[in-house]
Image (tube, grey):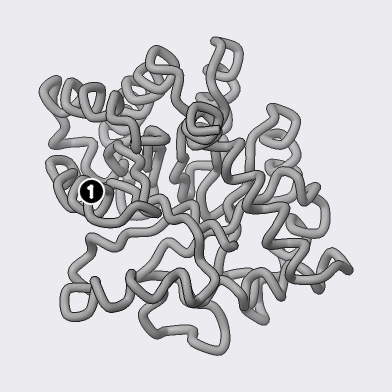
Amino acid sequence: MIFDTHAHYDDEAFDEDRDQLLSSMKDGGVGCIVNVCASAGGFDGTLKLMEAYPFVYGAVGVHPDDAEIMTQDTLDEIRRLSHMEKMVAIGEIGLDYYWHKEESEHQRQQEMFRAQMDIAREEKLPFMIHSRDAAEDTLNIVRDYMKKDMSGGIIHCFSYSKEIAAEYLKMGLYLGIGGVLTFKNAKKLKEVAAMAPLSQIVLETDCPYMSPEPHRGKRNSSLNLPYVAAALAEIKGITPEEVIAVTDENAMKSSAMINLRNRMS
């Protein structure tokens, strides 16, 4: 079964047919989904999905776009929610300099990134990293924390060079790959996918965003991941079924779900 390691089904894009869509996942070959928090104070949507659907798990954290409005109360809430059994990661957290150009904004993002990485370390949970136009700073912070008994993590929607990918892979981290892999102009990501061992790749949608071909520009969902699996299989010279099986196992290892599975077995 397909494991979608990064989705946002609490997004308003799903308001009209959320239950119908999520109820179709099993028939569509999707076995597990991690719904990832992003906005400060916007955790309730993920909590409701975790409660309503046995196959939906959660990641709790605040996207760097909201770093400016985060408070100590926000961090305390992230820590409290991280104790929930179905909360399997801290994320999405990281750095995004695309819209935020001022050095003061970068410093604030880095402060909140580190604060949430501290929670991941202390609560022994993996992290999910968002990084855009911030390759060097993100790598330096992650490298620093990986010396501190972290529980690993995923570099979500990986978009940098194969040289930077190699640094994350050396740290034992996973690369999240989604719909961009199917784009004709995704030369850099295809080089990364060819170089990275399949054992360190996980599938993700970032839905409702980043739909793969042939649905580029439309609302994305986990049901589109077979297109990504097929593209990755072609690059690796293996079958889509093998990609799905290996990335499903990787997703278990890269999240606290492996601990849940061990407790249930």
Residue 250 drawn above or below residue 117 = below
Evaluate whether residue 214 shows in this view: yes
Residue 135 drawn above or below residue 225 = above
- Please provide percent x and percent y for residue 128: 46, 39
- Please provide percent x and percent y for residue 259: 51, 28
Q: Which residue lies at the image location 42% right of the left edge and 84% below the top edge?
A: 217
Q: Which of the 4 quarters of the picture holds residue 209?
A: bottom left
Q: Which residue lies at the image location 42% right of the left edge and 61% below the top edge?
A: 206
Evaluate whether residue 138 shows in this view: no
Indicate left or right for 240 with 19 as reference: right
Residue 230 drawn above or below residue 44 = below
Of residues 238 and 153, the one drawn nearer to the viewer in this rendering? 238
Q: Which residue lies at the image location 18% right of the left edge and 36% below the top edge?
A: 68
Report the number of numbered marks. 1
Indicate left or right for 162 with 215 as reference: right
Element under label 1?
Answer: helix
Q: Which residue lies at the image location 60% right of the left edge and 12% below the top edge?
A: 147
- Please provide percent x and percent y for residue 216: 48, 84
Image quarter where the C terminus lies is: top right
Indicate left or right for 227 with 121 as reference: right
Residue bearing the label numbered 1: 51
Task: Give the amino acid at mark 1.
Answer: Glu
Of residues 55 and 105, the one drawn nearer to the viewer in this rendering? 55
Of residues 90 and 139, the one drawn nearer to the viewer in this rendering? 90
